[in-house]
Image (cartoon, rainbow, N blue to C red):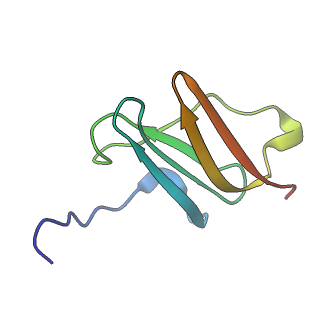
Amino acid sequence: DEGLIDTTVEATRGRHVRTVLFDPEQGAWLAGDDGLLLHSRDGGLNWTPTQEPPAAVGNAHWRSIAVHGNHTWIVGDPG
């Protein structure tokens, strides 16, 4: 698998990743179960948690991400 980087994202803490989006201007986004939402500005080598969501959505299971300009949308269902 030339060109692929095998990396472990420690910040997921065992939560399931459901979607990953790479945007040339906004970087990469990773989202999943139990409120998992991470952002990368270096092509996915390093991931940082985004601002913690309100308690009401902290356990949400995120399913999809969309980016348009400076706006990012995430959708999912309650945990």
Q: Residue at x 25, y 67 (%)?
A: 6
Residue 25, relative to residue 64: is it above or below? above
Q: Is residue 6 left or right of residue 70?
A: left
Residue 6, relative to residue 34: is it above or below? below
Closer to us: 34 or 39: 39
Q: Residue furthest left?
A: 2
Q: Residue at x 68, y 32 (%)?
A: 52
Closer to us: 4 or 24: 24
Residue 63, relative to residue 50: is it above or below? below
Q: Residue at x 47, y 50 (%)?
A: 21
Q: In which quadrant is the N terminus drawn?
A: bottom left
Q: Position of residue 29 (x, y in %)?
A: 49, 44
Q: Position of residue 72 (x, y in %)?
A: 60, 33
Q: Is residue 14 left or right of residue 8?
A: right
Q: Residue furthest front?
A: 68
Q: Residue furthest top?
A: 70
Q: Is residue 36 left or right of residue 29?
A: right
Q: Residue at x 87, y 55 (%)?
A: 78
Q: Is residue 69 left or right of residue 65?
A: left
* Res 14 quadrant in image: bottom right
Number of numbered callouts drawn: 0
Q: Residue furthest bottom?
A: 1
* Res 5 quadrant in image: bottom left
Closer to us: 34 or 71: 71
Q: Position of residue 62 (x, y in %)?
A: 70, 54
